[in-house]
């Protein structure tokens, strides 16, 4: 098959490219390599090309789940704001590649916007790419499915409404495995020249770093995904302590994080805030403790008004997690459901969810018509009624682990 030059990003010299084109996995892999070369060679124009392409993706061509690639044909980017949820390609590997690239951008430029995208891709599309029992996988990660239409409409031929055990081209399953197995490399960015340890992801574990020629260890104990609580214990490899900065990322979804150093609440004078990081500089002693609380407000997310697929709709986010409705909880016909602007949510209902991420319930509305449609497909004398409907939202990464059915991230919003 002969592809267009955009497919392989060979339509222009890479330094002249400003929009993300072609095969989405290839594009992000190429950009990860460009970022490596830009850092190694201190190549400003290559770094600027990376920044332009990054900006085009995250401001115009990325799904709210951190997935990319709107078109199944050529597994490719399409145009700005073209983000259909049901025909999305949104390959698991593309979000993994976005994470590879984000890590490299963070090594060149410590700006939390790269880590925010890394987190969005990881906690939504990437882990959704694998079933909760770790046995089955998604290649394509749509934001809306209807299994009945998937079976009959060839435009959905690439979409699966159940994860598969394996694929003819099985790139995604081992890619998830290698990312999860190497996640330690994404949690911290030590910036030696600034004597700063950047904390990018709040994933528990032990880390060791060399800053200013001396070693320090950090142990992170994290309930980030369930309560938003994180604890770090610092242990410099020196009895007199070690002067350096710890820069803690403020996630884009959190308005005001809370910080305690050795049990004492740290107010504005105890830290600086730069490029999305809370920076604490001090002489760290063995056993010094940082506690963080990131309050998880429920966010009603809207899409840019140029995105046709999301216009007039709302998507629910809590912490780093996007939520969705499934037919198994909410009955068939998710397109008839709407969420009033003042709907109040109850957090944590039903069975315990993975990673301690709660399900959400609320009272929404189902739109119904009172007419007997008979043989009519269209009619002018239709009266719609709204009935109260109990809605249950689950984290997007847990969808398709129960009965097969409809799923939707974006829900119509009502007054
Ligand atoms: Zn793949």
Image: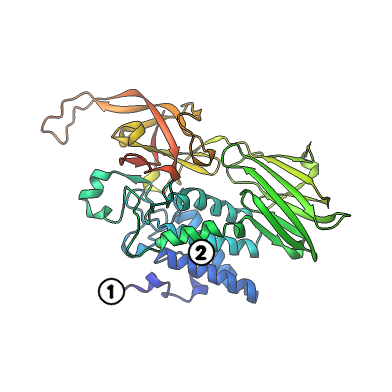
Residue 247, horizontal then vertical, whole percent: 71, 52
Residue 120, horizontal then vertical, whole percent: 52, 50
What colour-coding does the image apply?
rainbow
How far apart in space, not on screen, are marks 1 and 2 (Cα)? 27 Å
Closer to viewer: mark 1 or mark 2: 1
Q: Is residue 82 visible?
A: yes
Residue depicted at x 47% and y 50%: 127
Residue 185, horizontal then vertical, whole percent: 61, 60
> In the rendered image of this protein, does residue 36 appear above or below residue 54?
below
Q: Which residue is mark 1?
A: 1
Query: In the structure shown, which secondary structural element does the residue marked by tag 1 occupy?
Result: loop
> In the rendered image of this protein, does residue 317 appear above or below residue 383?
below
Image quarter where the C terminus lies is: top left
> Where, by quadrant of the figure, is residue 388 drawn?
top left
Considering depth in this image, is 187 or 45 the residue closer to the camera?
187
Query: In the structure shown, which secondary structural element does the residue marked by tag 2 occupy?
Result: helix
Considering depth in this image, is 258 or 211 the residue closer to the camera?
211
Residue depicted at x 22% and y 23%: 370
- Tell whether 147 sits left or right of 294: left
Q: Is residue 66 visible?
A: no
- Tell whether 236 sits left or right of 338: right
Q: Which residue is mark 2?
A: 53
Q: Please say if the residues under marks 1 and 2 sit with CB atoms less than 8 Å apart.
A: no
Considering depth in this image, is 278 or 215 the residue closer to the camera?
215
Q: Quadrant of ligand 1?
A: bottom left
């Amino acid at each position: 098959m002969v592809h267009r030059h955009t497919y392989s990003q060979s339509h222009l010299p890479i330094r002249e490219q400003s929009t993300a084109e072609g095969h989405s996995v290839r594009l992000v892999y190429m950009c990860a390599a460009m970022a490596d070369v830009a850092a190694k060679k201190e190549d400003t124009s290559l770094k600027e090309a990376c920044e332009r392409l990054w900006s085009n993706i995250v401001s115009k061509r990325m799904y709210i789940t951190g997935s990319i690639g709107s078109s199944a044909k050529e597994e490719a980017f399409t145009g700005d704001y073209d983000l259909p949820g049901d025909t999305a390609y949104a390959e698991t590997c593309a979000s993994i590649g976005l994470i590879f690239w984000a890590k490299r951008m963070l090594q060149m430029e410590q700006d939390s916007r790269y880590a925010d995208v890394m987190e969005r891709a990881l906690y939504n599309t990437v882990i959704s790419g694998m079933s909760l029992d770790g046995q089955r996988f998604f290649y394509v990660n749509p934001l809306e499915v209807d299994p009945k239409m998937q079976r009959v409409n060839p435009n959905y031929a690439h979409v699966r409404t159940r994860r598969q055990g394996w694929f003819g081209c099985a790139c995604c399953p081992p890619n998830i495995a290698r990312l999860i197995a190497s996640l330690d490399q994404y949690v911290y960015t030590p910036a030696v020249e600034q004597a700063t340890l950047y904390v990018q992801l709040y994933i528990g574990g032990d880390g060791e770093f060399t800053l200013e020629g001396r070693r320090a260890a950090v142990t992170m104990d994290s309930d980030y995904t369930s309560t938003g609580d994180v604890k770090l214990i610092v242990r410099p490899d020196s009895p007199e302590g070690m002067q350096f900065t710890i820069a803690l990322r403020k996630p884009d979804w959190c308005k005001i994080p809370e910080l305690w150093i050795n049990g004492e609440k740290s107010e504005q004078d105890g830290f600086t805030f730069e490029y999305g990081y809370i920076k604490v500089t001090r002489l760290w002693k063995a056993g010094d403790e940082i506690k963080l609380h990131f309050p998880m407000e429920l966010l009603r997310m809207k899409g840019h008004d140029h995105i046709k697929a999301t216009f007039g709709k709302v998507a629910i986010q809590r912490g780093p997690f996007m939520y969705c409705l499934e037919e198994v909880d909410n009955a068939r016909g998710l397109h008839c459901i709407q969420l009033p602007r003042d709907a109040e949510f109850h957090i944590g209902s039903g069975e315990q969810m993975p990673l301690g991420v709660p399900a959400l319930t609320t009272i929404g509305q189902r739109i119904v018509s009172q007419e007997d449609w008979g043989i009519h497909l269209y009619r002018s004398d239709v009266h719609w009624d709204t009935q109260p409907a109990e809605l249950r939202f689950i984290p997007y990464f847990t969808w398709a682990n129960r009965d097969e059915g409809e799923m939707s991230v974006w829900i119509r919003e009502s007054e």
